Amino acid sequence: MSTTKLKVVGKPTPKLDAGVRVSGKAVYGCDVNLPGMLFGAVLRAKFPCADIVAVDVSKAASLPGVACVITADSVDTNNISHKRDHPILKKGEVSCLRDEIAAVAATSREIAQKALSLIKVKYRVKEGIFDPFRALEPSAPQINRYGRNSFSNKNIAEEFHYEHGDLEGEKNRSACRIKRRYFLPRVTHCCLATSNITADYSPTERRLTLYSSTQVPFLYQRDMAHALKLEPSNIRVIQVTIGGGFGSKLDMYPFEPIAAILSMKTGRPVQIVYDRREEFLASPTRQMMVIDLMTGADTEGRFTFREVDIILDNGAYTSWGATTPFVMMQTFSSLYRVPACKFAARAVYTNNPYAGSMRGYGNPQATFALERNIDVMAREIGIDRAEIRLINANFPGEVTGQGLTYRTCGHRQALQTVIEKSGYGKTRDRQSGARRYKRGMGFASMLHVAGGAKIYRSDGCGTTVKLDAFGYLTVITGSNEIGQGSETVLAMIASEELGIGLDKIRVINSDTDIKPWDVGVHASRTSFVAGNSLLGAVGKLKEILSPKAAALLKTGVSDLVYEDEYIRSMTTGERIKLDKVVREIHFQKPNELCIANHFYEPNSELQDKEYRGNVSSAFAFGSQAVEVEVDTCTGNVRVLDVYVAQDVGRVLNPLGLQGQIEGGVVMGLGHALMEELIVENGRVLNPDFHNYKLPTASDVPNIRFYPVETLDQEGPYGAKGVGEAPLVPTPAAIANAVSDALGVEISSLPLTPENILKAIVEKHGI
Amino acid sequence: MEFEVKSPGTRSELLSAIIKTRTGFRFGAGYTDLIPELRKNGSPVRTIINLARLNDKRFTAITVTKRGIRIGALVTAARLADDPTIREYLPVLAQATSDMASPQIRQVATIGGNLCTASPAGDGACALMALEAECELLNSRNQARTITLASFFLGPRKTALERDELLQSVFVPANSGVRLFSGFIKVGTRRSMECSVVSLAYHVQTDSSGNVVHSGIAIGSAAPVIRFAHSACSLLLGKNLETMTVQDAGRFAQNVLEHASPISDLRASAWYRRQVLFNISKALFSERQGAAETNGSYEGKAHELH
């Protein structure tokens, strides 16, 4: 890998799949249409907490066009989720409104829906528990009886404790201690493609093929096999074009094995596609949480300690999302320097819709609480808000209390960049007087894993590269594309290294029967891990190509460069076409294929039981400055400018990077200002885009992006992970800006006009 | 959701379609509201009489006479927002329709649909209420009757239309003043694709020295139906806009609020609706000097619009 003169990497490159996407040729889940395919539909609970007294499916089963009806009694399955606390079809009781009671497969969607309406379920309604604090009371009944629970309370699904440093000592020497409680709402992914699955079971081959939108095909294959009691290798997962992942496809949900069971029972392909309402009702959300945070600083504004206690509303079943405290504790222990930290988090079962994982994985919530407290501390101590952040910024070479090792660290540079670019300090006069519109500026930083995250035994990725006799390269990567642009980045890397044009490179990444193993798309890891894996494979391919080329060019292998589809001798200037070299290798001695495999495992560590260890090979840092204008008549917040500086290691594809930054900021803006899945007594009250407010194009502010390139030696060309990071500090920075504009404290999201107006009225009166 | 679609091209085909359709039917024009409604309610509607292909000037034209401006029910929001006559003489309507939904929806959404759906949040309807519009209703016997917009709305989603009637056009009487202070304030969470949480339509006409000679004020999403704020209009009569005091503005806002009886729903509480309605009403006159840059309202001429 040479980074001296990059020809492809660093150049704005449109996504390889842009053409098929914009021309409507991309095959999304709902576009899959197999011969003889049936349509599946799921009957869900009518009450969030009830005993099921009886289920009668006879009328549905006899409806013409219905091929199969299943209930818990007609299937033999294992529970799903990493806690194995989630039955695929519920028997005896329901614990939330999403609960699957029965499912049908029919010749049309309409007949399937009609069949659902003919299923009679008799309930004995019970009082549910919708408040996680209530669930923790001794008198509360056990909500989920499946989980293996060794925690301090029967309704705790996951529990985390972490600490470093001398907490009491640091508390005592603090000049300022700030304690606040923060409330973070349920928001959801709003993927444009709704949840979908097409299952195709072949009774003759006993093979199950799944056309799926999963982000983690190999873990999915294993989970599906466990659920259905099949051999994992008899399950083939083919990824369709994914219309939005954002973490929502990290877990497998009941509808997926349900489709497989319906296909196995009927011997025909079965497709389940949610409509938008079902997507809102039955797909996961970000964790709703309550964060109690106490932080301290000395008289100079140096941070002394943090003490955190978090309650997460888990809902009725557990998803990977319950492990978001892994990420949150990193932010509390290691974003800005802090000598002591004590962190506790409990994910608590309730009868609410269950939460899942979502871009940032707890980090936007943690960062919101932390950065709000920093603003309050700055005011208490009487130190400038930008200054206090600079004083405490992370630095290269730092090893944090949790053992995170910052080999490279652009935190300080990112902070300085947004402080300078935003013109902070020069805009103060804008908010003087009693004008209707008040302006404010807010800052926030973030820390996120950026070199994978070792939470499974391996965080690795396999790659196979194949160069054919016509000079075309096929990259078969374990990683996958969920819209983040990794396919394009991989092709760019291969193009850079081998001197082959992007039009002669194919990336194959969607079929578990073909591609080598990979953990999946999560933790902003793909470009880093799959990029390194590809570089390893290309290196091995060159070990096949270079000796032959050197022999043909009568020179040594170290004299060769790969460029413009040729291999050239630097000393003689003589060159030979790449495809000719391949043919010489194929058809002459040594009669070898130009194929190479590589498995890359990042050098990160699994954390110990105290959650210490360098969990990622690199860390991303970022800072944002946000300027807002608040209409004090209506409470409307308009985000005017967002200045983003992010340590990305190196820019691989400026176009793709800009897209990730802008998309992240807008997602964070929605979280900050308007998004909330409103749930009352276990029921979702706004399961539609009419009342679940997603930002539109006209809400998008000016987004000014300044990449910070720290060239991390572990990353491909020095690059770090990017995907989740831009979202993480945005809600915090917006909240800080609104607080600055109005002089009010902000302790919850979203900052809807009504919540803002309430704060104004509370402060000033009407 | 399955139904038959009849697409009359002429007035006589339309009337015959109404007469011949015996099962439950609905009129459809832009379908931006109808399709979601039918999907949501699993409606028993068997037939849609599709007006989108109807070629009849009474339904499709904007006609200007000395008496006023007639707007066909099938005129789209996009056309109203762009029409030079509307922009010049009825800025409140141009602004309401240009802030509505999204460009795609404005291309097909009709003003007739905005009225007939009888939503208390209808933006075009709120503007037309401030303009004291009249509705021209046509029945299947080809007879027309005219009623005021105020009497057209009976309640949320309820209109004075008989089973065999449809809205043919709306008529806005000519302005009596020489200068206009006319605009539409839409309050919502986001800047587009938004159903008004509260709206205020104002169409204030003055003589050349700024004395109010006629005014129309209407409020949306603040009551079961869109309301015309009579007492607020009376308060303005004879006042000079240039010399209105902050106290006048406060009294005006109080008078507007008299007409509000909002509910609490998912989008906002009744408290918020009342509070905001008061604030924006007051700001309308207390901030009028800097109005162009502060509240987005504008005066009079089309070429001054941004």
Image (spheres, rainbow, N blue to C red):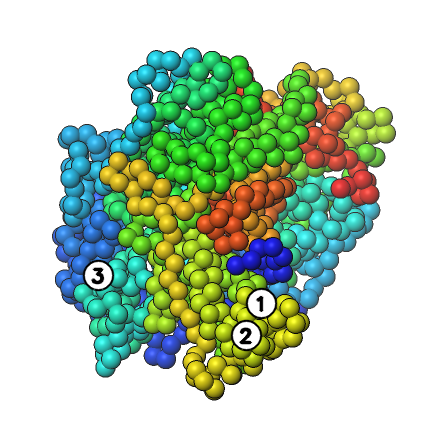
Relative to B63, is A400 above or below?
above
Q: Residues within 10 Å of mark 1 (few under 14, many from 20)?
A: some
Q: Which residue is painted at 49% across and 33% down in the image?
A: A395
Q: Which residue is painted at 27% across and 78% down in the image?
A: A202
Task: Give the amino acid at mark 1.
Answer: Asp
Residue under pointer 2: A550
Q: In the picture provided, is A188 more to the left or to the right than A259?
A: right
Query: Do residues under tags 2 and 3 come within 8 Å of each other at their CB atoms?
Result: no
Closer to the camera in the image, A390 or A192: A390
Q: Which residue is painted at 31% across and 21% down in the image?
A: A166
Give coordinates of residue B8: x percent, y percent.
Answer: 61, 69
Q: Residues within 10 Å of mark 3 (few under 14, many from 20)?
A: many
Name the chain letter of the residue that bears numbered label 3: A
In what element is the residue under mark 1?
Answer: helix
Name the chain letter of the residue that bears numbered label 2: A
Q: In the picture provided, is A170 more to the left or to the right than A495?
A: left
Name the chain letter of the residue that bears numbered label 1: A
Relative to B128, is B109 above or below?
below
In what element is the residue under mark 2?
Answer: helix
Q: Which residue is painted at 47% across and 65% down in the image?
A: A539
Residue under pointer 1: A559
Give coordinates of residue A203: x percent, y percent.
Answer: 23, 79
Query: Do residues under tags 2 and 1 come within 8 Å of each other at their CB atoms?
Result: yes
